[in-house]
Structure formats: C-alpha cells, structure tokens
Image: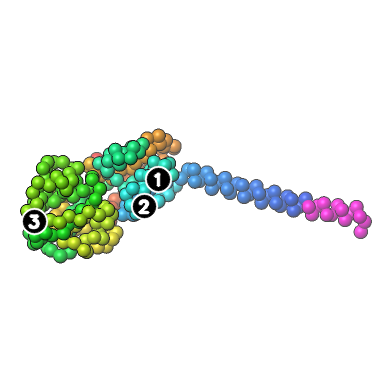
Amino acid sequence: MTQSSFTSRSSNKKLIIFGAIFVILIIGLFIWNKQRQTQNEELVIGISPPFAHPLQAAAKEAEKQGIHVKLVEFSDWNTPNITLNNGDIDANFFQHQPFLNNAIKETGYKLKAFGVGAASHVGLYSKKYKSLDALPQNARVVIPNDPVNQGRALLLLQQAKLIQLKDPTNYLSKLSDISSNPKNLQFIEVEGPQTARAIDDVDLAFGYPHYLRLAKTADPESALVLDDTTNKRYAILFVVRDDYQDKGDKLKKFVEIYQTSPAVKAALNEDLGPKLWFPGWV
C-alpha cells in the first residue's frame, strides 16, 4: 500500500466521521428546537390539587384540538399568584374574585380574571354531632384564616343561627365583627386547604366539598348545613397577568372547553356531587 493511498483512505474515514457527527448535531438541534417550540406553545396553568380532575378532563379535550396544556399543582393559596405574577406560568385556577381582589390589595400583583369556572357550595361538617342543636357550649370550630374565606365561613355560621354579625351582609366580616355568640364557640383559624383535615380534631368545621373529597375525611354531602347562596362571586377563576397575551387564543379555547365539555361536567359531578356545584359563567 502506497503512502498516498493510505492518506486518501484516512482522509475518507475522517470525512465520514465528521459527516456523521455533523448529521447527529443537526438531528439533535432539530429535536431541541422542536421541544423548545412545544414548550413555548404549551399552556401552563397553576392549580390547587382538588381542581385537578375536571381540568385534566379539559386538557385531554384540548389536546385533540392541538392545544397542549400543562397543569402545575400547588399545595397552598399563596404560591400560585406569586408564580403567576413572576411570569413563570400562563394562568392559575384556584381562587374566586374576592380572594383575587384581596391578594391584589395586599401585594400589588398585576393580575386579572380571564375566564370563569365552576362555583361550589360550602358547608359545616362534624364527625361528633349529628345536628347543629347538639353542639355544646364552647364547641371548637375550624374556619379559614384568610380574610376572604373567613368572611364566607362567618356568613354560613350566621345562616346556621350560631352567631350574629354586626353587618349581616358583609362577606368580608372578621371574628371581631361577631356581635352575638350564644354557644361561646371557640374558633380555630387554619390555612384554607387544611380545614378538610382539621375536621377530625374539632367539634365543627367549615369545609369545601372538593377539599373534603380529596382528603377523604368526610362525605361532602354530609354537611349539617350548606350555604344557601348561588352567588357567582365565589366561582373559581382563570387568572392571568394584566399584560397576558393569549397567543392563538389557547386559553380562551381551553376555558370554552372547560365550560362546555360533557367530560368536565362528569368530572365535577364525580368530585363534588351534582348538587354541590353550579356553573359560574351563566
């Protein structure tokens, strides 16, 4: 073998290797670009775990229409708004309008409602007593500690004739606004999501059906009393930043799917029971 032929073969091998490397790089770059495009096109929504099932049903329907939805779960009621305000997600779904108003007032977040979801009734639950009349003096009662949902709990306690508020119509009432408490109820304030788990340790608990269902601590339909309001003030909202741009109307279409899909309605019925929720958008 001559030196020239050896050099030629060696050069060919190098060309083949470099060519293979080049092709691999091109393929890798193509795959990375596709993934990046998919991530950019993905609709990311922050949620509370109790709302997952209906939203997962909506996400499956949206996928059929080419809308890729990623649901990110948060265990508390503060992080979803922090994350949204920072621009790390496109929207969140866990709060009603009074809660959003209060969050904006306290933090200065630049957020707004984009669409409306389902609303649910709330109730008073007990594992120790079968009726409100059976509640003893000094009974321990769990209520949410945030100002908005605490006000909702106090309105329900007033409806149940367990307390009286200074302003009977004020949905932002606080414990200091109680004007009459005949049973001398002892109030225990906890984070809203924890009310469902606290029911085992107290005489009475204010509860949300979807959180009770998730925690499996009580049958949501076993309330000693349910609120008698169908006020859409408490419908859960799809919330976005003030400067949000709905590219391709992805979120608009997703909200429409949520509101109209039989699969979503079935999920709501399964999670809450058909008598415990109502549409907030009609």
Q: Which residue is mark 1?
A: 83
Q: Secondary structure at mark 2?
A: loop
Seen at 33% across and 48% down, the residue is 78
Amino acid on which the number 1 mark rests in the picture: Thr
Q: Secondary structure at mark 1?
A: helix
Seen at 25% across and 58% down, the residue is 196
Count neighbours of disc 2 (C-alpha within 10 A) and say few if under 14, some if 14 to 19, many if 20 or more. Answer: some
Is residue 69 visible from the viewing direction of this image? yes
Q: Earlier in the sequence, mark 2 or mark 3?
A: 2
Q: Is residue 253 above or below residue 3?
A: above
Count neighbours of disc 1 (C-alpha within 10 A) and say few if under 14, some if 14 to 19, many if 20 or more. Answer: some
Q: Secondary structure at mark 3?
A: loop
Q: Which residue is mark 3?
A: 183
Outermost residue, right direction?
A: 2
Seen at 31% across and 54% down, the residue is 50
Which is more foreground, mark 1 or mark 3? 3
Question: Real-space Cα distance between discs 2 and 1?
Answer: 10 Å
